[in-house]
Image (spheres, rainbow, N blue to C red):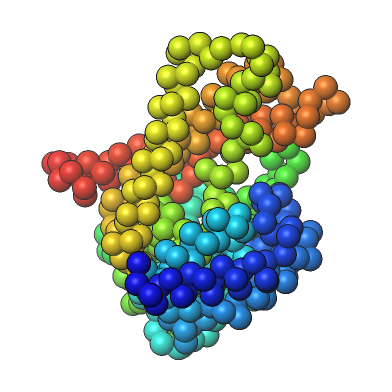
């Protein structure tokens, strides 16, 4: 390591030690995360202290250019920062679709005006974003969307609806795929728009789940006025932008580049190691049976290989997300999460099936609900079947 990098590491370690609040050096607690905006606040005031300090250094999005709210770190310096954050056990200061999805997409496709207007606000956590993609009749076949944007000269009028819009009830802005030409092949008549969720004509209806929570919504648009300056890229070429955004989401690299290690793979970790978890439920003198031991090792190897591949990809280019290969990340992550939670259930036995009640610990209830929730991870964000098709066609080059 060069002298410059050693000095940067020492400076970074000292700064983090001085400024990272103690409560931000613990595992993320549900409800304490910060995803931007003011409509859904973290329950921990330290989270905003941490956000303010990290944002001031550009470390909420450290690889973004300085003029857009980042720190302009190259790959080597970013890797040092990431390692020091992880050594400290620091939580990510900012998450959400702003830093992981629309921000990286605007860096590639946004106009200079769009970048200067939106990116610094994303980097500082000023706004929360949501995604307007899926519709009641356009899920896996996303290009079948029917939400229509009428061209009215200097603006569009958007009418239609989106469903499964995660976080729409507390989002400030939406990035949205709309149809702008009904007379061309469906992939060619789509545009990519940005608009405020406070715009007249936007109505959000939360979808309550069996656990009483409403992370998903259906969002309705009734002649929502969207200025032309909030069109990203070109009219009828939004499918290109929309696909690129999905690649940022599926790769997980944008989250990694903001030091966000609070994604699905982290949320499902038990409070102790898997062997310790087994000892807790089976007894300290019990031995792991050979089948369970093999399954635990295989699952751990899958996680290790995934993390190494992510890290290698990031080291190869801190600013570029790979293309169709991101479907591999999405597919592997979904399978890992489901397998890991199934293993935990096998170890906990009936104690792993607690929905509520005094006979179950908070962790047992939480993990049971995550186990059920994770059934959808191979569907959300593009089903496993869709990912395998992309891998076959775009990565392996197999015929249609």
Is residue 330 in sight in this rendering?
A: no
Residue in view at x 73 percent, y 60 percent: 22
Front residue (pair 353, 133)? 353
Residue 260: percent from left, percent from top: 54, 58
Total labels drawn = 0
Is 289 drawn above or below residue 107 in the view shown?
A: above
Front residue (pair 152, 337)? 337
Q: Quadrant of the C terminus?
A: top left
Q: Quadrant of residue 240?
A: bottom left
Front residue (pair 65, 102)? 65
Is 272 drawn above or below residue 135 in the view shown?
A: above
Residue 66: percent from left, percent from top: 47, 84
Residue in view at x 61 percent, y 21 percent: 278
Q: Quadrant of the N terminus?
A: bottom left
Residue 192: percent from left, percent from top: 42, 70
Residue lying at the far front in this picture: please name it.
3
Residue 167: percent from left, percent from top: 63, 57
Residue in view at x 33 percent, y 44 percent: 328
Is residue 80 in sight in this rendering?
A: yes
Residue in view at x 49 percent, y 16 percent: 292
Image-based side of 262 in relation to 178, left or right: right
Image-based side of 184 in relation to 3, left or right: left
Is 4 drawn above or below residue 98 in the view shown?
A: below
Is 304 drawn above or below residue 191 in the view shown?
A: above
């Amino acid at each position: 390591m060069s002298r410059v990098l050693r000095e940067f590491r020492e400076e970074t370690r000292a700064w983090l030690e001085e400024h990272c609040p103690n409560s931000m050096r613990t595992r993320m607690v549900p409800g304490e995360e910060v995803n931007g905006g003011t409509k859904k606040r973290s329950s921990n005031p330290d989270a905003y202290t941490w956000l303010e300090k990290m944002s001031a250094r550009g470390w909420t999005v450290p690889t973004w250019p300085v003029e857009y709210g980042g720190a302009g770190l190259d790959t080597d310096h970013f890797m040092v920062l990431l390692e020091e954050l992880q050594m400290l056990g620091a939580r990510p200061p900012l998450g959400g679709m702003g830093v992981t999805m629309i921000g990286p997409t605007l860096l590639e496709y946004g106009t200079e005006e769009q970048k200067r207007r939106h990116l610094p606000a994303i980097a500082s956590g000023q706004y929360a974003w949501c995604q307007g993609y899926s519709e009641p009749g356009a899920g896996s076949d996303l290009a079948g969307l029917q939400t229509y944007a009428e061209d009215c000269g200097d603006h569009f009028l958007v009418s239609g609806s989106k469903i499964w819009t995660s976080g729409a009830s507390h989002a400030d802005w939406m990035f949205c795929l709309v149809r702008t030409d009904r007379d061309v092949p469906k992939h060619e008549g789509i545009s990519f728009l940005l608009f405020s969720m406070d715009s007249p004509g936007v109505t959000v209806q939360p979808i309550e789940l069996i656990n009483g929570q409403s992370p998903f919504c259906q969002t309705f648009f009734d002649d929502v006025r969207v200025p032309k300056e909030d069109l990203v890229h070109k009219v009828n070429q939004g499918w290109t932008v929309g696909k690129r955004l999905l690649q940022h989401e599926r790769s997980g690299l944008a989250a990694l580049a903001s030091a966000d290690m609070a994604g699905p793979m982290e949320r499902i970790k038990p409070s102790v190691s898997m062997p310790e978890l087994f000892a807790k439920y089976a007894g300290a003198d019990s031995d792991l049976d050979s089948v369970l031991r093999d399954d635990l090792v295989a699952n751990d190897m899958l996680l290790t290989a995934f993390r190494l591949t992510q890290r290698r990809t990031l080291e190869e280019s801190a600013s570029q997300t790979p293309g169709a290969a991101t479907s591999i990340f999405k597919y592997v992550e979904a399978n890992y999460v489901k397998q890991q939670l199934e293993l935990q259930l096998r170890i906990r036995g009936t104690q792993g099936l607690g929905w509520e009640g005094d006979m179950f610990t908070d962790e047992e209830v939480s993990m049971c609900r995550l186990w059920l929730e994770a059934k959808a991870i191979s569907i959300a964000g593009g089903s496993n079947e869709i990912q395998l098709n992309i891998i076959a066609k775009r990565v392996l080059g197999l015929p249609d």
